[in-house]
Image: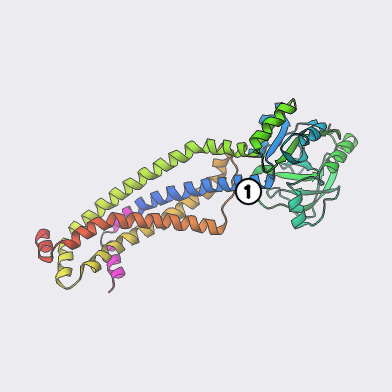
């Protein structure tokens, strides 16, 4: 008979109360774990998406600002154009280090039998800093005119042939998931490929693509190290009429502002729940100690010291808290996986599940909080019980 065995036997004697306490701890662990994991996944997608974009500023036509923001955040396919001459004017603005154009195209269905919501993005291989680093790392060559790169959620494989506007393209590679639909649901091709596709669409496609070679959709800008994106964005809008310069940080900060209220609400609810659970468990262990004063007194009289008795009570609390924590984490993970798509559909936010190491860290943190709650709740009642002299404890119990 050891301390752990004795603690388990004590918990089995009041199985209904044990199950109730485990359920209470599980509720808090579930809330904390699922909320933290959900918010962490959104933050991962925002961080990786901003890194992949590689731009400090996105310059778009002034009347297309809303469409551009929606495209960046939710990957909503859109199409707008502006004169290519704006590219050189942006390059001349003080504080601008590098620029590269992109062309956004909203495609029709792939084929009559294969319809996927995709977003065509054409880039300039000579100046691009968004897709070119991936090409250099994974293909070690430029894309051919008849080749494309697809996002992770596009259901195709390398080597597949996909037609756009009457022109067939071969899938040269698939990018890793970022959690942002702007990349994951996108199809990347060179500007030359897009212009040729538009030209041939007049005779090859049911729905021609009316885009000429002097049109682009956006200019991606990298600023000098001695300048801030906000400051350069103001200069661009001042020097060039009819454009809107969007600092990429403001796109993600908008999402974070939208989430701030949700984060505060979750934090307040979590703190309240934690406090309630702490009070309930403290009350429960006070009852447990009062019920077992005679037992504690007899054990003291038989030679058990205060440390051993405290260890028994804290071990009981640790078992309860650990069981509740494990159940809560499992429940929270299951709820998040089951309802993730529904929540994202309504919130329209990017989402990228954490890496295994990060997930393990979050899990361990949730379990430690649950364990700490149980031990803290049992500590004061346990210390109060073991300080009572054996004879006094037996007499009070009677």
Residue 165 found in image quarter: top right
Most frequent secondary structure within the magenta stretch: helix
- Considering the image in quadrants, where does the C terminus appear? bottom left
Residue at image point 24% right, 56% down: 380
Residue 254 found in image quarter: top right
Residue 292 appears in view: no
Residues 278 and 257: in front is 257
155 to the left or right of 165: left
Residue 188 appears in view: yes
- Give the x, y percent position of residue 236: 72, 31
- Give the x, y percent position of residue 321: 35, 57
- Give the x, y percent position of residue 96: 73, 38
37 to the left or right of 123: left
Q: Please determine whether, in this image, residue 171 is positioned above or below residue 191.
A: below
- Magenta residues span 1-21
Q: Please determine whether, in this image, residue 70 is positioned above or below residue 328.
A: above
Residues 283 and 63: in front is 63
Q: Please determine whether, in this image, residue 30 is positioned above or below residue 293.
A: above
What color scheme is it? rainbow
Residue 232 found in image quarter: top right
How many callouts does the rendering have?
1
- Considering the image in quadrants, where does the N terminus appear? bottom left
Residues 4 and 360: in front is 360
Can you name the residue that lies furthest to the front here?
226
- The residue labelled by disc 1 is 48
Secondary structure of residue under mark 1: helix
Query: Does the magenta run of residues contain 277?
Result: no
- Mark 1 crowd level (few <14, some 14–19, many ≥20, 10 Å Cα): some
- Give the x, y percent position of residue 325: 40, 56
């Amino acid at each position: 008979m050891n301390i752990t065995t004795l603690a388990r036997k004590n918990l089995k004697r009041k199985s209904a109360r044990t199950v109730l306490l485990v359920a209470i701890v599980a509720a808090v662990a579930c809330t904390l774990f699922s909320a933290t994991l959900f918010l962490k996944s959104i933050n991962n997608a925002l961080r990786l998406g901003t890194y992949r974009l590689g731009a400090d500023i996105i310059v778009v036509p002034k009347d297309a600002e809303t469409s551009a923001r929606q495209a960046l955040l939710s990957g909503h396919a859109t199409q707008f154009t502006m004169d290519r001459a704006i590219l050189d004017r942006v390059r001349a603005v003080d504080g601008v280090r590098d620029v590269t154009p992109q062309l956004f195209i909203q495609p029709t269905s792939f084929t009559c039998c294969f319809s996927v919501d995709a977003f065509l993005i054409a880039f300039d291989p000579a100046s691009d800093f968004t897709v070119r680093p991936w090409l250099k790392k994974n293909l070690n060559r430029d894309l051919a005119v008849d080749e494309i790169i697809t996002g992770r959620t596009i259901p195709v494989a390398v080597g597949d042939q996909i037609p756009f506007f009457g022109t067939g393209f071969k899938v040269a590679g698939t990018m890793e998931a970022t959690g942002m639909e702007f990349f994951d649901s996108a199809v990347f091709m060179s500007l030359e490929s897009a212009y040729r596709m538009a030209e041939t669409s007049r005779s090859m496609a049911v729905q021609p693509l009316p885009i000429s070679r002097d049109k682009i959709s956006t200019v991606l800008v990298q600023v000098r190290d001695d300048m801030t994106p906000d400051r350069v964005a103001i200069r661009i809008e001042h020097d060039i009429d009819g454009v809107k310069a969007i600092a990429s940080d403001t796109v993600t900060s908008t999402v974070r502002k939208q989430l701030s209220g949700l984060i505060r609400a979750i934090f307040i609810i979590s703190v309240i729940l934690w406090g309630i659970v702490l009070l309930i468990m403290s009350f429960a262990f006070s009852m447990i100690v009062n019920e077992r004063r005679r037992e504690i007194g007899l054990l003291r009289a038989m030679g058990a010291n205060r440390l051993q008795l405290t260890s028994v009570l804290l071990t009981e609390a640790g078992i309860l808290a650990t069981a509740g924590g494990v159940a809560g984490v499992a429940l929270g993970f299951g709820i998040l996986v089951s309802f993730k798509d529904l929540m994202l559909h309504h919130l329209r936010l990017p989402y990228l599940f954490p890496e295994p190491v990060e997930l393990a860290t979050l899990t361990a943190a949730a379990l430690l909080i649950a364990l700490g709650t149980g031990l803290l709740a049992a500590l004061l009642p346990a210390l109060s019980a073991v300080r009572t002299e054996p004879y006094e404890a037996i007499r009070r119990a009677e």
